[in-house]
């Protein structure tokens, strides 16, 4: 009895919270970047300032958010204690410094500084892989989520290796393939090898918990693991060496993504939770963008579409539409819970505590939803046609949504110090005791 | 065994529980109270302590008699299907009202890893097993109880 039931959560939940909040700041910076860099977005994507914006999104926002989520998922879902909380803290400092350095040097076009920042980032990634790898050592059950987490971290390692090669290329041209082939492989590794498995793995646990719906069935689990496991290497090799593999890889990855989308639809239809909060609406809307990303991705892989406009629209659909809306939605569900746990769990059962819903701001979240979903949809279309005015309009919508997102998170985080949080009204919404 | 589904009610008895609530929760309580001349009808609003004093019986004897009919089995609390953090709140509320020596058996759909530190901090011991797929059973009692 006693302690042997628990893995020892350490400083949970402050570490995941710190990562998620840093990521949200990067998201806001990225939305401002869309407004600022609208003319560049109407041109070719291989532009230093656009690459700065892309890395603000992929590293500052998405990667840091996913790493923070990993530090929650590993102890809670995989039931393995975090190997080193201290390492996780230092890693965040390192990552924020490295990403800021990379974005600044990309923006300025200074390559020696970029290479140094990329090296620092690689150190941060290695520390993360070490921490997660040693934490997952001894996992008793290789569940669907555990498998996808392992797959995703393998993808992160490969993405970082390719990224480091591209950074060094600016100083010494030592790439195994053509620059654009390597660049495209790096992008696809990041999207499909790192981000996609992590989102699919986390969604398989988080959506059923909050929707109170069914877990993915065996066929869906197999389709996702096999589709990504075979599809991602095929896409990468197809881009770099054997072009004929590219459509096959694209189809395999699309089957995995469609299988995920189909399960999300099923679990939503069979949910026991009657009313959907804004967080879940965001995540479910994000899933809709998968279809658009698949259409664009397969069209690009089979040469039905080509050129920078279609490529940029594909990147916006997948990074902004699917990944960003999904992460925003998950954060609106997870952050209040982390804050509630830190602020109120020790009081629960002994005195009235606010309900989880009291930490949210439904009006703000509804405003966010309108701005971010509208902005992402508009940006996909505007990027496709390359119209500066529409890109800037979409950017303004996204910036408004980003500001509302940060404001909503700040309202939640204020509860960490209940004396400062405005909980006087919310205390009436005590979690009711059943008669 | 007392069965509660998603609720914080429990079978453990305390001197401050009202007679009415005990009669409602436990079949057989009426007979015990009548045998000890404790008024369970007009005195339903009284606490066990007050009712014992009014009837001129020992509080310990009355509690012991009521404990016997409530049984020594653990109280069951089913929190499966509840949205976080309600399972944790329900369990902690139930424990707050658990009688000394009583045991709470929680039925959950996953291992509640965030609950364990709260139980440890409050001086409860706990044991978890999975008797069947989809059912995680946690037995909780006060340390030393």
Image (tube, coloured by chain):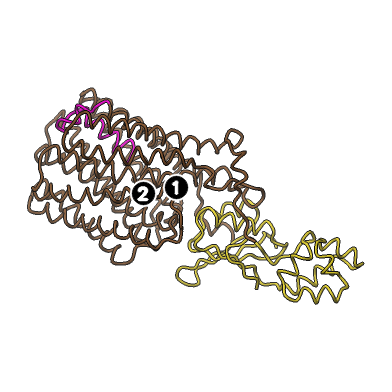
Circle number at residue A333: 1
Picture quadrant of residue A30:
top left
Alpha carbon separation for disc pair 1 and 2: 10 Å
Q: Earlier in the sequence, mark 1 or mark 2?
A: 2
- Please provide percent x and percent y for residue A196: 28, 50
Pointers 1 and 2 within a single chain: yes
Task: Name the tint of chain A in the rendering.
Answer: brown
| Callout 1 crowding tier (Cα within 10 Å): few <14, some 14–19, many ≥20 | many
- Please provide percent x and percent y for residue A361: 48, 40
Q: From which residue to which does the magenta span run?
A: A36-62
Q: Quadrant of the N terminus of chain B?
A: bottom right
Looking at the image, which residue is at 62% across and 60% down? A434
- Please provide percent x and percent y for residue A19: 41, 39
Of A59 and A399, which appears nearest the observer? A399
Mark 2 secondary-structure assignment: helix
Q: Which residue is mark 2?
A: A283
């Amino acid at each position: 009895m006693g302690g042997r039931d628990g893995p020892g959560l350490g400083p949970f939940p402050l570490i995941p919270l710190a990562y998620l909040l840093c990521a949200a700041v990067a998201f806001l910076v990225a939305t401002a970047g869309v407004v600022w860099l609208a003319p560049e977005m109407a041109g070719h994507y291989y532009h230093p300032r656009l690459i700065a914006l892309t890395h603000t999104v992929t590293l500052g926002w998405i990667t840091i958010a996913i790493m923070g989520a990993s530090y929650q998922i590993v102890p809670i879902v995989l039931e393995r204690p975090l190997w080193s909380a201290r390492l996780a803290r230092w890693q965040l400092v390192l990552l924020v410094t490295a990403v800021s350095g990379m974005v600044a040097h990309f923006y300025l076009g200074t390559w020696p500084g970029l290479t140094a920042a990329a090296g620092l980032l690689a150190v941060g990634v290695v520390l993360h892989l070490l921490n997660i790898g040693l934490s997952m050592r001894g996992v008793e059950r290789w569940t669907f989520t555990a498998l996808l987490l392992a797959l995703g971290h393998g993808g992160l390692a490969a993405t970082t290796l390719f990224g480091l090669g591209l950074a060094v290329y600016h100083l010494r041209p030592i790439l195994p393939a053509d620059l654009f082939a390597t660049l495209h492989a790096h992008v696809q590794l990041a999207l499909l090898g790192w981000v996609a498995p992590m989102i699919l793995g986390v969604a398989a646990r988080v959506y059923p918990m909050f929707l109170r719906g069914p877990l993915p069935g065996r066929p869906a689990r197999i389709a996702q693991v096999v589709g990504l496991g075979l599809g991602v290497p095929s896409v990468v090799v197809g881009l770099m060496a054997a072009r004929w593999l590219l459509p096959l890889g694209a189809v395999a990855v699309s089957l995995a993504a469609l299988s995920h989308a189909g399960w999300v639809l099923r679990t939503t239809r069979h949910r026991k939770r009657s009313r959907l909060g804004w967080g879940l609406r965001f995540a479910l809307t994000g899933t809709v963008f998968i279809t658009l990303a698949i259409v664009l991705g397969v069209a690009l892989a089979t040469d039905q579409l080509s050129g920078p406009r279609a490529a940029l629209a594909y990147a916006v659909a997948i990074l902004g539409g699917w990944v960003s809306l999904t992460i925003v939605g998950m954060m609106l569900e997870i952050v209040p819970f982390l804050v509630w746990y830190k602020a109120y769990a020790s009081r629960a059962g002994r005195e009235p505590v606010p309900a989880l819903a009291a930490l949210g701001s439904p009006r703000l979240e509804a405003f966010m939803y309108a701005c971010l979903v509208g902005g992402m949809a508009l940006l996909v279309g505007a990027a496709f046609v390359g119209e500066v005015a529409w890109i800037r309009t979409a950017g303004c919508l996204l910036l408004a949504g980003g500001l509302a997102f940060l404001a909503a998170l700040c309202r939640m985080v204020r509860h960490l110090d209940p004396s400062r949080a405005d909980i006087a009204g919310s205390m009436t919404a005590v979690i009711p005791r059943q008669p | 065994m007392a069965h509660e589904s998603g609720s914080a009610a429990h079978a453990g008895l305390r001197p401050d529980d009202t007679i009415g609530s005990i009669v409602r929760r436990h079949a057989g309580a009426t007979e015990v109270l009548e045998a000890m001349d404790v008024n369970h009808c007009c005195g339903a609003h009284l606490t066990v302590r007050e009712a014992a004093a009014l009837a001129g019986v020992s509080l310990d004897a009355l509690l012991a008699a009521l404990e016997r009919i409530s049984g020594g089995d653990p109280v069951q609390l089913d929190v499966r299907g509840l949205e976080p953090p309600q399972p944790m709140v329900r369990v902690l509320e139930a424990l707050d009202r658990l009688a000394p020596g009583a045991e709470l058996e929680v039925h959950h759909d996953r291992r509640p890893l965030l609950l364990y530190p709260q139980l440890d901090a409050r001086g409860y011991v706990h044991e978890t097993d999975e008797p069947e797929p989809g059912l995680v059973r946690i037995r909780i009692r006060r340390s030393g109880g």
